[in-house]
């Protein structure tokens, strides 16, 4: 065999050995993506149901109007003299996800300029080793943190613990705000793009003046305790749910990017295999033609070229 044929044959063998691995990774990323999306739907339904029931419970309390007229809770009010603000960036731990982390890192520079307030120290917390590498390239100062992902899903216990820490710092006046830069899904599509979501100060829960029809499960709920403290507990819970939703969307976006990257790699590999197969067949045909010509010349049937 010629040197060209040897190289082409070796490359073809490598690519054919790579194909099953690419297919397996594609199936795994697709499975993880669907699992995360299913969990997201469950969490969204829970949050919507919880908010609806909470509003109705507060409306039915004897002091509902007093509570609803209260404009802000401690989680709504912006701290007058805070020491720091926090920007949390949720990236990926694993690779093979295309431009996922590079786009996030590039977007972070724009976000930092937008949210940085005077006399407030902005801290950037980066989650994900791959993201941290890209932030270094973009020359963005950050504090590295271990990922909040356990297996293929967010670690709910770690996320809740971190959220409790932020809430305590916010209520003490040490923390001005918590913003999260992460991938969010575009409604009506399977695409994701980086967006900033503000966790603290939180949006005030809107309490309806006229209660709607109550779930048949609780026709006559009884509320014990101060409605204001109940509202604050509800707010805390909904903020934690929102953070968990952001983590889920990050995992879903990462797997979407990974699947797309692997899909492109699969198509590229298939094209290369086709090209190399054609090249090898052509080389073999030329080699066979040359051998036949040499035999014919050796037999004296035709003269040499």
Image: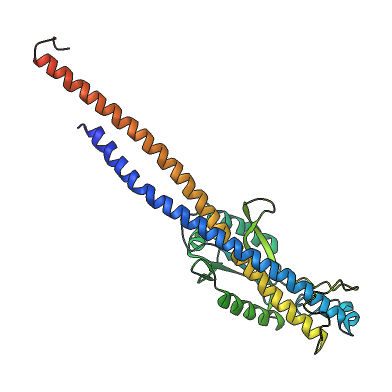
Q: How is the image coloured?
A: rainbow
Q: Position of residue 208 (x, y in %)?
A: 87, 72
Q: In this picture, is 83 found above or below 224?
A: above
Q: In this picture, is 9 found above or below 230?
A: above
Quarter of the picture holding the C terminus: top left
Q: Residue furthest left?
A: 299
**Residue 167 vs residue 188, the one in the foreground:** 188
Q: Is residue 292 left or right of residue 159?
A: left
Residue at 81 percent across and 75 percent down: it is 55
Residue at 66 percent across and 81 percent down: it is 169
Which of the 4 image quarters holds residue 266? top left
Residue at 76 percent across and 81 percent down: it is 232
Res 82 seen here: no
Q: In this picture, is 96 found above or below 11?
A: below
Q: Position of residue 221 (x, y in %)?
A: 81, 83
**Residue 36 vs residue 290, the one in the foreground:** 36
Q: Is residue 143 left or right of residue 246?
A: left
Q: Position of residue 184 (x, y in %)?
A: 64, 58
**Residue 50 vs residue 168, the one in the foreground:** 50
Quarter of the picture holding the N terminus: top left
Q: In this picture, is 236 found above or below 273?
A: below
Q: Position of residue 253 (x, y in %)?
A: 57, 57
Q: Is residue 203 left or right of residue 260?
A: right
Question: How many numbered discs?
Answer: 0
Q: Is residue 32 left or right of residue 56?
A: left
Res 75 seen here: yes
Q: Residue furthest front?
A: 216
Residue at 26 percent across and 25 percent down: it is 285
């Amino acid at each position: 065999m010629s040197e060209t044929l040897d190289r082409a044959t070796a490359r073809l063998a490598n690519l054919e050995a790579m194909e099953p691995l690419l297919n397996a990774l594609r199936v795994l990323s697709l499975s993880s993506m669907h699992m995360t999306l299913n969990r997201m739907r469950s969490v969204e339904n829970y949050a919507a149901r919880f908010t609806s029931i909470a509003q109705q419970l507060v409306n039915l309390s004897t002091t509902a109007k007093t509570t609803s007229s209260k404009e802000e809770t401690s989680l709504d009010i912006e701290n007058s003299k805070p020491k720091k603000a926090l920007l949390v960036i949720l990236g990926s731990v694993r690779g093979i996800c295309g431009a996922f982390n590079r786009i996030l890192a590039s977007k972070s520079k724009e976000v930092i300029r937008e949210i940085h307030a005077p006399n407030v120290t902005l801290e950037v917390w980066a989650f994900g080793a791959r993201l941290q590498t890209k932030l270094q390239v973009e020359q963005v100062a950050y504090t590295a943190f271990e990922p909040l992902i356990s297996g293929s899903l967010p670690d709910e216990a770690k996320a809740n613990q971190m959220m409790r820490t932020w809430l305590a710092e916010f209520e003490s006046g040490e923390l001005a705000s918590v913003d999260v830069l992460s991938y969010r899904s575009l409604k009506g599509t399977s695409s994701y793009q980086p967006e900033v979501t503000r966790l603290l100060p939180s949006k005030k829960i809107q309490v309806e003046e006229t209660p709607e029809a109550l779930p048949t499960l609780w026709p006559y709920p009884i509320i014990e305790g101060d409605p204001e403290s109940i509202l604050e507990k509800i707010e805390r819970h909904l903020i934690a749910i929102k953070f968990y939703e952001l983590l889920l969307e990050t995992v879903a976006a990462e797997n979407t990017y990974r699947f797309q990257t692997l899909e492109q790699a699969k198509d590229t590999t298939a094209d290369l295999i086709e090209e190399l197969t054609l090249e090898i067949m052509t080389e073999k045909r030329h080699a066979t033609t040359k051998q036949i010509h040499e035999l014919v010349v050796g037999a004296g049937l035709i003269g040499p070229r």
